[in-house]
Image (cartoon, rainbow, N blue to C red):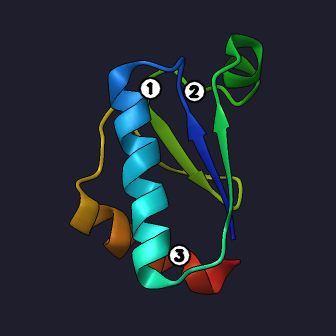
Amino acid sequence: MKIEIIGPGCPRCQEMHRNILNACAELGLPADIEYITDIAQIAEREIMSTPALLINGEIIMTGRVPSPSQAKEILLKHKSNG
């Protein structure tokens, strides 16, 4: 599973990154997690609202931070897709 956290490095983006990392660890879910803060790379992905969460190239969430339990739900839902 390839996970991308997209955002300029603001506290909300960092919170999403932490929640996703912790959810993967708690679920024992192997994932390639990348935290993208480069504005040019964000623009390439056509992300207009951060933080954003992409799983296997699909935009899953933008503009809000999933709670720890929501992060687990999202990962479990998408784990079979990658």
Query: Can residue 79 be spotted in the picture?
Result: yes
CB-based contact (under 8 Å), mark 2 and mark 1: yes
Q: Position of residue 41 (x, y in %)?
A: 76, 23
Query: Can residue 61 be spotted in the picture?
Result: no
Residue placed under numbered mark 3 in the picture: 78
Q: CA distance from mark 3 to mark 2?
A: 20 Å
Q: From what the image shows, is residue 26 above or below residue 17?
A: below
Count of picture labels: 3
Query: How many residues crowd mark 2 within 10 Å: few (<14), some (14–19), many (20+)?
Result: some
Query: How many residues crowd mark 3 within 10 Å: few (<14), some (14–19), many (20+)?
Result: few
Give the residue drawn at x 76%, y 13%: 40
Image quadrant where one finds the N terminus: bottom right
Q: Position of residue 60 (x, y in %)?
A: 48, 53
Q: Position of residue 42 (x, y in %)?
A: 67, 23
Kind of residue at disc 3: His
Q: Quadrant of residue 67?
A: bottom left
Residue placed under numbered mark 1 in the picture: 50
Give the residue drawn at x 44%, y 82%: 27
Question: For this rendering, which residue is in front, 37 or 63?
Answer: 37
Mark 3 or 2, nearer chain start: 2
CB-based contact (under 8 Å), mark 3 and mark 1: no
Q: Quadrant of residue 55?
A: bottom right
Query: How many residues crowd mark 1 within 10 Å: few (<14), some (14–19), many (20+)?
Result: many
Q: Position of residue 81 (x, y in %)?
A: 65, 80
